[in-house]
Amino acid sequence: MTPLTTPRLTLKSFTLDDGAFIVELLNDPGWLRNIGDRNVRTQDDAREYLRKGAFAHEAEHGFALGAVQLSSDGALIGMCGLIRRAGLDDVDLGYALLPAYRGQGYAREAAAAWLACGFERHDLRRIVAITSVDNEASGKVLEAIGMRFDKRMRVPGHDADSLLYAAQRDSP
């Protein structure tokens, strides 16, 4: 994937060297509460998670969840990208940040860049995002980038309802 850049961020593919970061992010209490336990506890688990997840998805679709990196110092702060998820008809925008980087506009900046990329580079007509019902902060991020609440639904494989947000590509 060609990296995306924003004023403060570089959005790029993960590498196998990002294993320690993946372990940290996927075991953050916010990730576990809002996204779910992926049983990634070691760097070997993380490398397997990347191989079967982001790397395979990017090879098949040309996009995937990738690293969110501060342009200023190269620090990895989260993940963001587009995925085709079972149970959703449209491509899904997803993101998560480490706690120290939340509330600073990074999620909005990364999500807006990926939304634009999905419409412009990948010629998608509609992009959706799902959040936990009680994740108000994520809903605010999605609304700030132009997505609108669509419906409450149960995504296959999830034990609880989610909120679905959607954005349509503007007509050419």
Image (tube, rainbow, N blue to C red):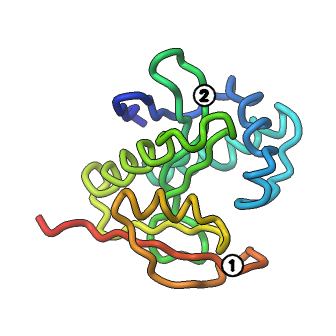
- In front: 59, or 103? 103
Identify the amino acid type marked 1. Pro
Q: x, y percentage for residue 123?
A: 27, 59
Of badges 2 and 1, the one in the foreground is 2
> In which quadrant of the rendered view does residue 100 lie?
top right
Identify the amino acid type marked 2. Leu
Above or below residue 64? Residue 168 is below
User: Residue 170, labelled with which disc?
Assistant: none
At x 56%, y 69%, the residue is 130
- In front: 6, or 105? 105
Q: x, y percentage for residue 147?
A: 38, 67
At x 63%, y 76%, the residue is 162
Considering the numbered disc 2 on the image, is that residue within a helix, a strand or a loop? strand
The single residue placed furthest to the top in the displayed view is 73
Above or below residue 62? Residue 127 is below
Considering the numbered disc 1 on the image, is that residue within a helix, a strand or a loop? loop
Sort mark 1 into few (<14), some (14-19) or many (20+) by Cα contacts within 10 Å.
few
* Distance CA(mark 2)–CA(mark 1): 30 Å
Sort mark 2 into few (<14), some (14-19) or many (20+) by Cα contacts within 10 Å.
many
Residue hosting label 1: 156
Q: x, y percentage for residue 163?
A: 57, 76
> In which quadrant of the rendered view does residue 47 lie?
top right
Q: Decide if residue 74 is on the left or right side of residue 111.
A: right
At x 79%, y 37%, the residue is 23
Residue hosting label 2: 76
Above or below residue 1? Residue 87 is below
Q: How many marks?
A: 2
Specify which label sits upstream in the sequence, 2 or 1.
Answer: 2
Q: x, y percentage for residue 120?
A: 25, 52
Image quadrant containing the C terminus: bottom left
Q: Decide if residue 134 is on the left or right side of residue 91.
A: right
Image quadrant containing the N terminus: top left
